[in-house]
Image (cartoon, rainbow, N blue to C red):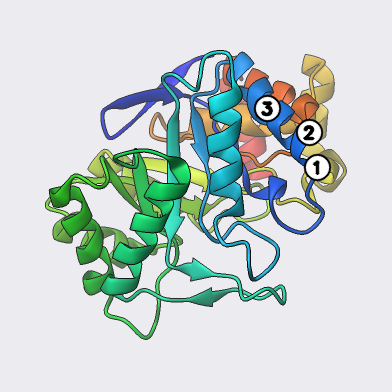
């Protein structure tokens, strides 16, 4: 597994998005645990979670607790793994998502995440999504305070536009470690944010890099160029997609979601697939 960097911390070039293990359609606990352990076996050292990754209203933090338990049960006890979590998004239990970017809420949510993860400091804590009802700088200011207090080791933001990235970078005094935005063959409008992260030396973490839970399996049938390159290389279109993303910039660290050990294995191999300039150009045009 090749490596990348987030805030000076070395991580695997491919991460594990843990959301599918806790929301609607989630696997049973044993398969979820097996998926996390498969990721560790593949050399994956970045796991992305959030307090809002749950299904029912009364199980906030389900995914964080699952990840903590799986790491504790692993033979390596999760040594060297960076667990990235988020706050500021909520799920009331009816399938919808709501927002709370108030600084006092984010600080309280961080404390609760610390408890569920069973750590003294969260490796990477991210503001999950901008709240239109709260000044963005005030929300990010809560992360700056958490950094200063030693509650978190690195701070990141998610679902941010270029102006918000610049604002967070300023509020955090140059300590912005990551930006987690949607980016995939289907959703390419985050290219300006990716390039800004490259300019600032901030890690860019594409979420739903394969198109999301419902469409990831059909990536090849939806995008013929990815299928064609995959057929030539004798690999899956999903693996080609992750290799394409990694080739776009050294700050990119995709976090494909998974709930099965088999998909973790295929995703991890995307870090070792080297595409030619011609193949990359073809996929850029797809």
Give how far across and how far down residue 254 sits, in percent: 54, 37
Secondary-structure class at tag 2:
helix
Q: Residues within 10 Å of mark 1 (few under 14, many from 20)?
A: few
Q: Which residue is mark 1?
A: 28
Tell me which corner region of the image, top left, top right, bottom left or bottom right, holds residue 192.
Answer: bottom left
Residue 267 tag number? 3
Give how far across and how far down residue 105 sits, in percent: 34, 72
Give how far across and how far down residue 232 sits, in percent: 81, 18
In this image, 23 relative to 87: left or right? Answer: right
Q: Earlier in the sequence, mark 2 or mark 3?
A: 2
Judged by depth in the image, the label closer to the viewer, 2 or 3, is 2
Relative to the observer, which residue lies in front, 136 or 52? 52
Q: Is residue 137 above or below residue 210?
A: below
Residue 207 in view:
no
Kindly identify the residue that appears in the image at 82 percent across and 40 percent down: 224
Q: Which residue is mark 2?
A: 31
In this image, 198 relative to 53: left or right? Answer: left
Distance in Å between CA atoms under marks 1 and 3:
21 Å
Secondary-structure class at tag 1:
loop
């Amino acid at each position: 597994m090749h490596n990348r960097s987030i805030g000076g911390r070395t991580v695997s070039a491919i991460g594990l998005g843990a959301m599918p293990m806790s929301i609607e359609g989630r696997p049973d606990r044993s398969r979820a645990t097996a998926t996390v352990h498969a990721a560790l076996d593949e050399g994956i050292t970045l796991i992305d979670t959030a307090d809002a990754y749950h299904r029912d209203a009364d199980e906030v933090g389900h995914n964080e607790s699952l990840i903590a338990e799986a790491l504790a049960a692993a033979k390596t006890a999760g040594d060297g793994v960076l667990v990235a979590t988020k706050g500021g998004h909520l799920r009331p239990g009816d399938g919808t998502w709501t927002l709370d970017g108030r600084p006092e809420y984010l600080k309280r949510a961080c404390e609760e995440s610390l408890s569920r993860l069973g750590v003294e400091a969260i490796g990477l804590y991210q503001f999950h999504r901008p709240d239109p009802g709260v000044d963005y700088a005030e929300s990010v200011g809560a992360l700056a305070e958490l950094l200063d207090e030693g509650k978190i080791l690195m701070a990141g933001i998610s679902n941010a536009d270029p102006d918000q990235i610049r604002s967070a970078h300023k509020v955090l005094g140059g300590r912005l470690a990551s930006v987690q935005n949607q980016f995939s063959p289907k959703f390419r409008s985050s290219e300006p944010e990716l390039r800004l992260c490259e300019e600032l030396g901030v890690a860019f973490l594409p979420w739903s890099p394969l198109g999301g839970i419902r469409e990831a399996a059909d990536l090849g049938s939806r995008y013929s160029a990815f299928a064609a390159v995959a057929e030539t290389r004798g690999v899956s279109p999903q693996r080609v997609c992750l290799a394409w993303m990694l080739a776009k910039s050294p700050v990119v660290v995709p976090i494909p979601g998974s709930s099965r050990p088999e998909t973790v294995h295929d995703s991890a191999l995307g870090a070792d697939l080297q595409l030619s300039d011609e193949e990359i150009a073809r996929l850029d045009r797809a």
